């Protein structure tokens, strides 16, 4: 008998230390993407408290509450129609909440919009840039709308997003990834403390996604709060420190990625002989829930490697040894037990009852 651990979570939340040459020149002492980064004692940059939104007679956002701190990458996850975009629009004062408060650096977004919004840089949906202008001309245009943004600041953000070689080319010649970086440069012109990104990796190829991930980590390492809305759960698990899961306008959970996947569900895969007798024993245990819809909640690679006779269960790890002893006493041969921590995607599907992300 073997008891193993297939802990996918530990593998996916480990963050690399890659950074750009420009970033190294600007901040050579920063360790990018450290798993030891702890922002729990940092300044709260944005606080969303008991926010609700009613349109006509329908309540579409129900009591949303979360904080995002300096130096933190915060993921906002939900299926199509869950309320992500509506919430983001309230964060940047495009629409007003029916109830609740949103404060940015201590300023109420609804009562003090100018003071609050000066601390926010955002890209909601797609970056708005002018294709017939060069990248530099686009940034000059947006710089005129913000006080204190001079040519030196434009150079800084261009270098930070690594567009210095193409900044004087027309945007019509840019790839999607370059347009995304130009949009982020625009959002950073005013030196915001909070960057809001809506689907920042949407449409990017794997190389572009990796570059965007490293860049977002760099911003967080410099102390910026980054709020990322996305439907790419695997990417969020790689990128974010904490997440909020929203479904049907309600926040189902807020917490650290590792904390959520380890706290909310523990699973074990059993290899037993005879299988039917072992399955009956597991079904009769008060500690065990048999997972029948395996394809929805277990990673395909684990299902394939486990074989057709594997029994997938949800249970606390502390009861495994007791059950193994019980099976042995009952004449059941335990060929193996594999402990699994779910991925964020599996946790999401369970919490939202299988809603599809779009």
Image (spheres, grey):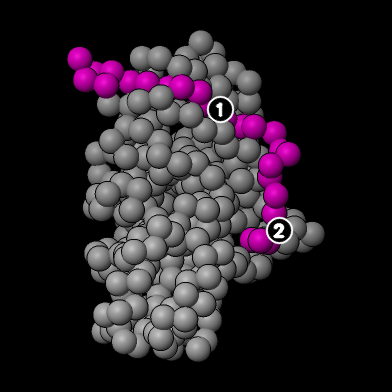
Left or right, 295 with reference to 69: left
Tell me the quarter of the picture where residue 284 sits: bottom left
Tell me the quarter of the picture where residue 209 sits: bottom left
Horizontal and vertical percent for residue 323? 47, 72
Calculate the distance from the C-alpha at mark 1 to the C-alpha at mark 2: 24 Å
**Mark 1 lies on residue:** 47
Helix or strand or loop: what does disc 2 sit on? loop
Q: Residue at x 36, y 33 (%)?
A: 250
Viewer can see residue 151: no
Assess whether mark 2 and mark 1 are in contact (beta carbons under 8 angstroms): no
The disc, 1 or 2, on the residue closer to the chain's N-terminal end is 2
Q: Mark 1: few, some, or many residues within 10 Å (few <14, many ≥20)?
A: many
Given residues 26 and 125, the one toward you in this image is 125
Magenta highlight on residue 43: yes
Tell me the quarter of the picture where residue 108 sits: top right
Left or right, 234 with reference to 255: left
Q: Residue at x 28, y 68 (%)?
A: 294
Taking the view exactly as shown, the residue that stands out farthest to the top is: 111
Q: Residue at x 27, y 26 (%)?
A: 60
Magenta highlight on residue 255: no
Given residues 101 and 20, the one toward you in this image is 101
Horizontal and vertical percent for residue 42? 71, 38
Horizontal and vertical percent for residue 59? 27, 21
**Mark 2 lies on residue:** 36
Write down the region rendered in magenta.
33-59
Up-down relation of residue 231 to residue 16 (above or below): above
Up-down relation of residue 132 to residue 162 (above or below): above
Left or right, 30 with reference to 2: right
**Residue 18 shows which numbered tag?**
none
Taking the view exactly as shown, the residue that stands out farthest to the right is: 29
């Amino acid at each position: 008998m073997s008891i193993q651990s297939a802990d996918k979570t530990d593998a996916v939340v480990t963050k690399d230390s890659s950074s750009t040459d420009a970033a190294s020149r600007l901040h050579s002492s920063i360790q990018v993407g450290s798993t030891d980064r702890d922002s729990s004692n940092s300044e709260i940059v944005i606080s969303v408290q008991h926010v609700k939104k009613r349109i006509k007679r329908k309540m579409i956002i129900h009591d949303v509450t979360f904080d995002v701190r300096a130096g933190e990458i915060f993921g906002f996850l939900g299926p199509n129609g869950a309320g992500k975009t509506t919430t983001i629009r309230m964060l940047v004062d495009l629409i007003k909440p029916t109830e609740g408060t949103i404060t940015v650096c201590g300023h109420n977004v609804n009562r003090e919009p100018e003071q609050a919004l000066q601390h926010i840089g955002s890209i909601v949906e797609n970056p708005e840039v002018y294709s017939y202008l060069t990248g530099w001309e686009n940034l000059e245009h947006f710089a005129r709308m913000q006080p204190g943004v001079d040519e030196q600041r434009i150079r800084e953000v261009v270098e930070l997003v690594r567009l210095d070689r193409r900044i004087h080319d027309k945007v019509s010649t840019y790839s999607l990834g370059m347009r995304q970086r130009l949009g982020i440069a625009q959002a950073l012109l005013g030196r915001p403390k909070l960057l809001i990104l809506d689907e920042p990796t949407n449409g990017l190829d794997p190389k572009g996604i990796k570059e965007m991930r490293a860049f977002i980590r760099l911003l967080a390492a410099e102390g910026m709060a980054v709020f990322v809305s996305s439907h790419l759960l695997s990417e969020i698990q790689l990128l974010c420190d904490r997440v909020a899961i929203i479904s049907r306008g309600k926040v189902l959970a807020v917490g650290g990625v590792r904390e959520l996947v380890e706290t909310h569900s523990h699973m074990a895969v059993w290899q037993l002989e005879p299988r039917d007798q072992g399955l009956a024993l597991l079904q009769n245990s008060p500690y065990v829930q048999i997972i029948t819809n395996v394809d929805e909640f277990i990673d395909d690679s684990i299902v394939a490697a486990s074989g057709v006779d594997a029994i997938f269960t949800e249970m606390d790890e502390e009861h495994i040894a007791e059950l193994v002893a019980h099976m042995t006493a009952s004449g059941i041969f335990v060929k193996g037990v594999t402990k699994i921590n779910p991925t964020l995607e599996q946790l999401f599907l369970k919490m939202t009852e299988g809603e599809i992300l779009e």
